[in-house]
Amino acid sequence: MSFVYYVNDMLFFGVMTIADKRDLYDEAVRIFVRLSEDPDDLAFQRQKDAFLNRGEAEREAYRKVQRAWKVSAAKPSRPPYAIIIFFVVAATLSYFALPEARTFLYADHRTGVSSKEVRLASDDMAVLDAGSALTDDTGQTARSVALLRGSAFFDVQSNSRPFVVEVDDLMVEVLGTQFETALIDDEVRVSVLKGRVSVSRNDATWTLEPGDQLIRKPDGRVEVAAVASSTIASWRDGQLIAKDLSFAQIAEIIDRRLPGRIVILDQATARSEITGSFDLTRPDLALEALAVTGSVRVINITPFLYVVTSG
């Protein structure tokens, strides 16, 4: 997925030994922020004491968070949360760069901040959305690709060899059709514009007709519902027509088109469902429109960091 981070229930980062440092600073920020909101909370006071008593690494992490907070207090025009987020993101970009680099290293086709049409080895056409990556494993017996991240719209020629798209834990198989596959915020969506599509996972199989959309939720649940043809890969025309997408999913799609990263400060905002139309040709304005729709605000700390806050 793109680097849209949720902060409050969980904050990701790391520098030390990636996972350990991430968890260490996650805990330090959560304790500090909660105590700043409610200094009389005895449970968090005890949690802070236990955290600091564990060792020097914990104490150093907590000191860094305190310093970031003091800097923000001296500059009231910059919200404390934003300063903390800027500090931890800037200090730990290496953690996120690793999976990003691996994904794009393995990809045969990849995009930056704009979409691109590509011709696959099978001679079929695909349009990759911004920030997307695809491997092409076509061989003698099958036409096969794997969507590593982002979204792709496929225009598959009728052929005796099946065309297979692997996306996360799903296998999408067609003979000739037009359809979109998308991996957005750990959720997979397969939407059919033309023809018939077979989607399988383990022993389960779903057959999709034009106007059908299969959604595999992050928790593994699968739903099939009707979808308007105008919403399928609408990003090809520079528009995002969203129906019942979460705030985080829309933010991720916009994020792919920005040079920086979007930070969402709380899970309630991230999970809220949004329906609307957004102009992806101006991602900065699209993010502002999303914020207005979600009744939150965007703080642009640098050209590389956008903070979404309800405060």
Image (cartoon, helix red, strand yellow):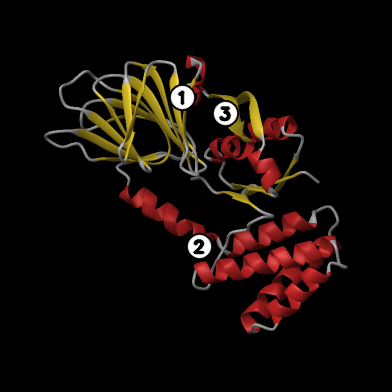
Name the amino acid type tagged 2: Ser
Q: Which residue is mark 3?
A: 280
Which structural element holds mark 3?
loop
Q: Earlier in the sequence, mark 3 or mark 1?
A: 1
Which structural element holds mark 1?
loop
Picture quadrant where residue 254 is located: top right
Q: Which residue is mark 2?
A: 94
Name the amino acid type tagged 3: Leu
Q: Residue at x 65, y 82 (%)?
A: 54
Task: Tell me: residue 275, above or below residue 149.
Answer: above
Instruction: Give x and y (percent) for residue 73.
Output: 84, 62
Label 3 neighbourhood size at 10 Å, few (<14), some (14-19), many (20+)?
Answer: many
Instruction: Give x and y (percent) for residue 167.
Output: 36, 39
Q: Which residue is mark 1?
A: 233
Assess whether mark 2 and mark 3 are in contact (beta carbons under 8 angstroms): no
Q: CA distance from mark 3 to mark 1?
A: 12 Å
Task: Tell me: residue 197, above or below residue 138.
Answer: above
Q: Residue at x 52, y 73 (%)?
A: 16
Label 2 neighbourhood size at 10 Å, few (<14), some (14-19), many (20+)?
Answer: some
Which structural element holds mark 2?
helix
